[in-house]
Amino acid sequence: LFHHVFYGIMMILLCVVFKYGASGSLAATLITSMSFSIYCLKQLGFRYEIDKSIFIEALKFCWPLIIAGSLQYFFSGVDRALLAGLKDDTNLGLYNIAMRITSYIGVFYAAISMTIEPDLYHAIAKKKYKRLALIVSGLLAFKLSLVLLFNLFAPFIISILTSGRYNAAVPLARVMSLKNISSFIYSTISVVIIGLGYSKVTLVNRIVGTVGVYIMFRILIGQHGFVGAAWGQFFSYLILSFFSMAFIAMKMWDKKRRLTKAS
C-alpha cells in the first residue's frame, strides 16, 4: 500500500510540482523501485541461495507466463507505435497524458487487489467457488466505483495533475478508463486458469489474442484515429477475456463429457 502511495507522490512531485515532465516520470519510477527493492531485501534478510529442484519445477510452470508477459507490448505499446504514423504530435501527446492519468486508477485498485489475490488462489485450490464469486464481485464493484468516480471528476483531476494545460485529454481519458474494467475481467479469468494449473493456456490465449488485438488496432486507428485507439484499449482485454472464457467452457464441456461416458 505504501509503495503505491509513495509512487503516486513522487509522480506528482517530480512531474507536476517541479515540472520535470518525462524525465520526472522515469525518475519517479526508478526512485520508487530502487528504494522499495532495498527495503524489501533488508526485511527478508536476503541471501543468494537456489534450491535446484524447486527452481526447475517453478521454471517448468512459469516459462509460458514469462513469454506471455513479454507480449504485453501489444496491449500497452503497439497502439502508440501505430498512432505515431499519423504524424499528429499534439494528439499523440494528449493520448499519452490520458493513458498515464487513467493508469492511476490501477494504482489505487492494486493496493486492494494485491492484498486479496492470495484469497482467490486459496478459494480455487479449495474449490470454494461461492467464496471466489463473492471476492470477485466485491473487487468488480470497487473497480466500477473507481472508474465511475474518475469519469465524473475527470476534468478536475486532469486539470490539477497537468496544471490546467492539457484539459483536451479529458475525452480520451474517459474512454481509456474503461480499460480498467475489461482488464479486470481478463486478469480474474487468468487467475482462475493459472490457479487450475493451466499456465500454457495463458500463453496460447495471449498469442492468439495478440494477433486479434493487432488487427483490431489497425482497423480502429485507420478509421477513427486516436479515439479508435482509446476504445481499442478497452476492447483489447475483452478479446483476451473471450478466448480465456472459451477455454474454460471447453474444459467444462470436456469434463462433463468424460463423466457422462464413465457413467
Image (cartoon, rainbow, N blue to C red):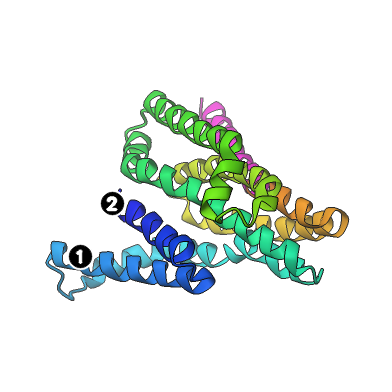
- Horizontal side of 88 relative to 144 (left or right) equals right
Asked if the stretch drawn in magenta spans residue 187, the answer is: no
Q: Which mark is residue 105?
A: none
| Residue drawn at 35 percent across, 34 percent down | 123
Mark yes or no: residue 49 visible: yes
- Horizontal side of 71 relative to 27 (left or right) equals right
Q: Amino acid at mark 1?
A: Tyr
- The residue nearer to you, when weighing 261 against 131, is 131
Please state the horizontal and vertical placement of residue 114, each as a whole percent of the image. 35, 46
- The residue nearer to you, when weighing 66 against 219, is 219
What residue sits right under mark 1 in the picture? 39
Q: Quadrant of residue 252?
A: top right
| Residue drawn at 52 percent across, 53 percent down | 161
Q: How many neighbours does mark 2 have within 10 angstroms: few (below 14), some (14-19), or many (20 or more)?
A: few
- The residue nearer to you, when weighing 196 against 138, is 138
Q: Amino acid at mark 2?
A: Phe
Q: Which mark is residue 2?
A: 2
Q: Quadrant of residue 11?
A: bottom left
Asked if the stretch drawn in magenta spans residue 259, the answer is: yes
> Marks 2 and 1: in contact by CB < 8 Å?
no
| Residue drawn at 64 percent across, 63 percent down | 74
What secondary structure is the stretch in magenta mostly built from? helix
